[in-house]
Image (cartoon, grey):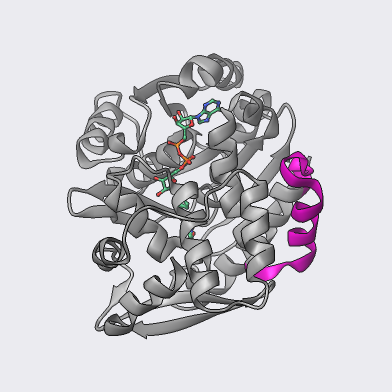
Amino acid sequence: MNTVTVTASKTYHIYIGSSLLSSLGAEAAKLGKAKKVCIVSDSNVWPLYGQAALDSLENAGFQTVYFVFHAGEHSKNASTWLELLNTLAENQLTRTDLIVALGGGVVGDLAGFAAASYLRGIRYIQVPTTLLAAVDSSVGGKTAIDLTSGKNLAGAFWQPSLVLCDTDTLNTLPRDIFQDGCAEVIKYGILYDPSLFSHLEEKGLSFDREAVITRCVELKRNVVAEDEFDLGSRMKLNLGHTIGHGVEAKSHFAVSHGTAVAIGTAIVSRASNCADCERILSVLQAFGLPIRTDYTAEELYTYTLSDKKRSGGSVNLIIPKAIGHCSIVPTPVEELLPFIKAGL
Ligand code: NAD
Ligand code: GLY
């Protein structure tokens, strides 16, 4: 097992390794004070890991309740969030009790936002079960739901009290969802770590999971410690996301997050004439990720501009110069369409 410690507005540990789910109860007990735990999960993850999570928590002496919603991005909305808040209230969870987010990024974002808002904030534990959640969404405290006007438009910065990443849970992931998470793993290599990138080039999909997840989490930990509230360097984690969110939105979320990030990364790499563009495109393809889209530049432009990362008359694009070297470039809105055209 590897441990990474995040020091931000809250200090917490991230445990990464095999067979960790059975220690959930014991680890939750170490946080102290809680009597009740509400496990939040989705309709795919709950049948696979719900009982193990319940057993572990109950064996450690907790009273448990659970809230399971229909899997998918379409559930990450205000009505599921409100239903969850009502479940917490009906079951009389107090300010010292706990929420456990058992699932991928959708579960983590929704449960995290409920934790941030219920009784003005209670503690929660992230138990990521997708690669994307393990390397990205479970760490760093960004929580959110989608509004009809766009993705992640309501949320809060609210750090978890513990992240327990049982790498065995990734074994049940459908291949396409595992590949989806690889887009975020590749992102860390491009942004910060040439040796991680080379490892991915060399090993492809059979990369060393525990080591790679740990490295990604260490890199994210460093970013969060420096810029918890996303006012500066954390924006780099949006490599491929700004235009990627345009792809997601245009598809009405039929295109998944990682796949959209891969397309966005390919577009910015080509448009900015990145020195390592060919290596980036090759790795994305080796991981089964797309590097092109059928959407037109005009369509991507329109949906990209509806993203919340627009700031005044410009959009912050993350531009890869070479592997390990990327910069934040405020790009005037009028330059965005030609930029996207150049990258298609
Ligand atoms: P997801 O949570 O929808 O999971 C993808 C699918 O995999 C779902 O159908 C889920 O039920 C299933 N699944 C999850 N774990 C499984 C397992 N172990 N075995 C079998 N099936 C399993 O999606 P995701 O890709 O994990 O996350 C995407 C979400 O994360 C988006 O909403 C995105 O906005 C958000 N996100 C948030 C942050 C952040 O910092 N908060 C960062 C990146 C992405
Ligand atoms: N996933 C982007 C961030 O956490 O800032």
Rendered residue at 33%/83% (across/down): 335
Any part of residue 255 in sight: yes
> Residue 1: which quarter of the image?
top right
Q: Position of residue 179 (x, y in %)?
A: 59, 41
Q: Position of residue 310 (x, y in %)?
A: 30, 73
Any part of residue 54 in sight: no
Rendered residue at 44%/48% (across/down): 257
Taking the magenta stretch, the answer to whether it contains residue 235 is no
Q: Nearer the viewer, residue 147 or 242?
A: 242
- Indicate left or right for 279 with 183 as reference: right
Range shown magenta: 191-211
22 over 127 or under it: above or below: above
Rendered residue at 18%/48% (across/down): 148
- Indicate left or right for 105 with 183 as reference: left
Q: Nearer the viewer, residue 186 or 11?
A: 186
Q: Position of residue 110 (x, y in %)?
A: 36, 41
Q: Nearer the viewer, residue 93 or 104?
A: 104
Q: Work out which quarter of the rendered image holds the C terminus and state it.
A: bottom left
Q: Position of residue 149 (x, y in %)?
A: 18, 54
